[in-house]
Image (tube, rainbow, N blue to C red):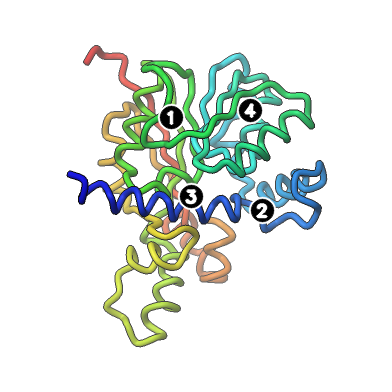
Amino acid sequence: MTSLQTPSRDAKRTIRAYWERTPCGAKHARAPEGEPEYFAQVEKRRYELEPFIPKFADFEGSRGKRVLEIGVGLGTDFVRFARAGANVTGVDLTEHSIELVTRRLKLEGLDGEVRLADAEALPFEDDSFDRVYSWGVLMVTPDTQRAVREAIRVLRPGAELCAMVYARRSWVAIGLWARYALLVGRPWRSLADVVANHIESPGMKAYTEHEVRALFTDLEELRIERVGTPYDRRVAGPLAALTGGRLGWFMVVRGRKSTKAR
């Protein structure tokens, strides 16, 4: 049993170290870390690159609800929920993010709780939240299936989960394959392999729609939407506009926890 668990612990340690060094979105800020202008720059660039986030996050619709965000990063979406009047709780695997989001809440005079926690073992009771939200995080952790089960476990029956994961059959993944497989004489490398080794933290995963349906099979009213992004346009240029979301890098998953007794 120990030998099976060690690789996961080692992988998680590597992932944590990566995001401790570089919280998501930090590269978009030029102001000193932790200053109001730093957070403003991060926020501005996030919604320039991903203007569709508010549509899926539905910040205003969260007013008065108990919302959990898994993987707060620099807190950009998290504070939008807080500004909208949600009762927000956030978790992250890194101390760096927790410290920065705590400071951000204080700077804005907002209420919210942030905790250092592992998505694969959430420190909350069953059926605790009216909404669970996670944008680009669940595919980072080594055991994504376990993280998904945890996200659903803490969601109250009938409530909604919204998560974004990366799509393997996408322009971004194809671009990575061309650069790190085809052009270096290793065309046998798979899309999954190049994504795992050449984007963000080691072991990153990207999925097919069939795989995503299997991951989130316990949700009712499951909806999966492919989203074309600026990251696809950087790879494919005008071809990305022709394919729309069909080869988009993002897959947004939404569904509700069953109200049926288990």
Residue 94 placement (x, y as % from top left): 54, 43
In percent of the image, x 59 and y 23: which residue is there?
Answer: 88
Q: Nearer the viewer, mark 2 or mark 4?
A: 2
Judging by the rendered image, the residue that carries numbered circle 3 is 16
Q: Residues within 10 Å of mark 2 (few under 14, many from 20)?
A: some
Is label 4 in contact with label 1 (beta carbons under 8 Å)? no
Asked whether disc 4 touches disc 3, contact meaning CB atoms under 8 Å apart, the reply is no
Q: Which residue is mark 2?
A: 26
Q: Is residue 73 above or below residue 169?
A: above
In this rendering, position of residue 178 left or right of residue 220: right
Give the labeled residue for mark 1: 161
Please, is residue 111 above or below residue 243 in the view?
A: above
User: Spatial distance from mark 2 to mark 4, Cα to Cα?
Assistant: 20 Å
Viewed as shown, does residue 134 lie left or right of 148? Answer: right
Whichever of labels 1 and 2 marks the residue nearer the N terminus, that label is: 2
Please tell me which of labels 3 and 1 falls first in the chain.
Answer: 3
Identify the residue position indicated by label 4 in the image.
Answer: 81
Q: Nearer the viewer, mark 3 or mark 2?
A: 3
Please give the name of the residue rendered at 64% of the width and 25% of the height, measured from the top-left corner.
Answer: 60
| Along the line of sight, the residue nearer the viewer: 118 or 182 | 118
